[in-house]
Image (spheres, rainbow, N blue to C red):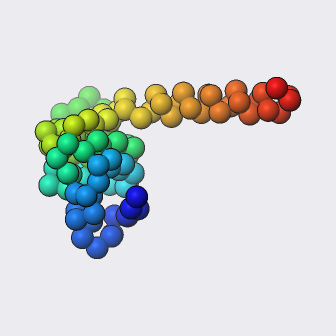
Amino acid sequence: MTICHSRTTNLAAHTRRADILIAAIGKPEMVTADMVKPGAVVIDVGINRVEDPSAKKGYRIVGDVKYDEVAAVASRITPVPGGVGPMTIAMLLANTVRAARLAHGR
């Protein structure tokens, strides 16, 4: 396992070695296809708002991974929005139930 950040020297060299790449950078579409090992699983945790005059609200939501580009290289990829968000909510609820049970001695 390797942990990097947005300013890691030669970041792409590190990300290209990953079989599973989890992106939580906070920079819209920073991870591009040339940074991903062919066949890797890519989990995009980022959520960013970017201006888009053609969108009804004037913006659109994108992840930290350039989805269309990386999807052509990765074996699996999570979309943004709609990827890890539902799992985050499910795990939060499961942990809340577990904490309540532990608090009441069950």
Q: Specify whether 90 is left or right of 66.
A: right
Residue 60 shows up from this direction: no
Which quadrant holds the C terminus?
top right
List x then y, in percent, for residue 18.
Answer: 29, 54
> Which of the 4 quarters of the picture holds residue 71?
top left
Residue 4 shows up from this direction: yes
Q: Residue at x 62, y 28 (%)?
A: 94
* Total numbered labels placed on residues in the image: 0
List x then y, in percent, for residue 72.
Answer: 13, 39
List x then y, in percent, for residue 87.
Answer: 47, 30
Q: Specify whether 86 is left or right of 36.
A: right
Depth check: give the residue in front, 43 or 37.
37
Farthest residue to the right: give it.
Answer: 105
Q: Specify whether 6 is left or right of 90.
A: left
Farthest residue to the bottom: give it.
Answer: 9
Q: Residue at x 14, y 55 (%)?
A: 34
Q: Residue at x 33, y 70 (%)?
A: 8
Q: Residue at x 20, y 51 (%)?
A: 37
List x then y, in percent, for residue 9.
Answer: 28, 73
Up-down: is 21 above or below 72?
below
Which quadrant holds the N terminus?
bottom left
Depth check: give the residue in front, 88 or 51.
88
> Which of the 4 quarters of the picture holds residue 50?
top left
